[in-house]
Image (cartoon, rainbow, N blue to C red):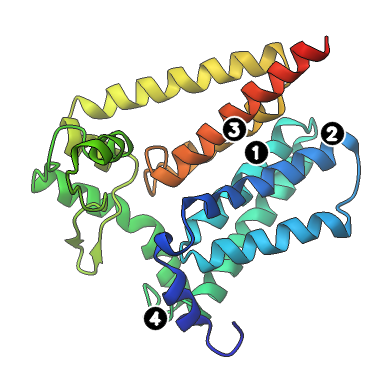
Amino acid sequence: LISAPALLAKNFQVISYVGYLNTLNILIFPSITLYVLQFKKNIRKKYLLYLIPAILGLILAGNKTYIMVGITSAFFIFAINTRHLSKILLRAVMVVTGFIAFFVIYQAYIDIGVHFDKGYGQGLYNYFSSSWIALGKLIENDMKSPKWGYYTFYFVYKIIALFTGEHLGNNYMPFVSIPSPLNVYTMNGELFSDFGWAGIPAGMFVLGLIMELFRLRLAKRKEVCIEITYTTLLTSVSFSFFVEMITQPYFLINLMYLMLFNYAYASMEKEVK
């Protein structure tokens, strides 16, 4: 890993090597944060045994987004359970600073040269702002999906394909030149390609409705999985200026796991009572 990190990441960056179950490591970050806050305990060595392999596994998956989702979700867990605004702002500054440091290190040793050929400062700006320019190109060229709702409902199409034998290919959006090639179009890109202009407000309405239902459930009763699910959804919204997460297979698998775990835990509680 130390001698040839770029080569090692290249060999593992295709998620099929380790399976989507590897992305469940994302949940380690908010889970440990919630445990420490609820039980007022410091992170002991045994929890580092969970955290360090989780970070390594996500790095080997070859996608910076996974670690960013985990850390951001952990921050929202802290923000929800903390009443002191100064502490929240301090943690926010720490998270942003950590992200910048992580990106610089990752690009220097793993993703060498990508987006950073004009320096790290310009590279970070381009990385997070170019998606809006790409979205403009997407709308200008009226780039449509291969089929209705393809990107939004890709996970559903993939399940159906198991029975029909249809080969769907991947769910990567096509690239545009701005002038560097890019296929990230904020949260609105997939909605526009799938459903046209009407898809953007409709998609935002459905997402807001789902999040409000979770918020109301959380307000009535503190449930671990519901809280982590809600903060994970908050994370997808916080990155909406850059990328669409919520319909990605890894994101849906994490949400489904949380829902199943919460259902199983609630059933066990009823049996005990």
Q: Is residue 234 visible?
A: no
The residues tagged by marks 3 and 4 sit, at their Cα atoms, a distance apart of: 37 Å
> Which percent across, then down, holds residue 228?
64, 34
Q: Mark 4 belongs to which amino acid?
A: Gly
Q: The C terminus appears in which quarter of the rendering?
A: top right
Mark carried by residue 199 = none
Q: Quadrant of the N terminus?
A: bottom right
Q: Earlier in the sequence, mark 1 or mark 4?
A: 1
Viewer-proximal residue, 125 or 233? 233
Question: Which residue is located at x 58 percent, y 28 percent?
Answer: 260
**Rendered view: 237 above or below 205:** below
Do the CB atoms of the residues marked 3 and 1 lie less than 8 Å apart?
no
| Residue matched to label 2 | 38
Crowd rating for badge 1 (residues with CA inside 10 Å; few <14, some 14–19, many 20+): many
Q: Amino acid at mark 2?
A: Gln
**For this view, does 173 lie left or right of residue 258?**
left
Q: Nearer the viewer, residue 12 or 29?
A: 12
Residue wearing tag 1: 76
Mark 4 sits on what residue? Answer: 113
Q: Is 100 on the left-hand or right-hand side of 86?
A: left
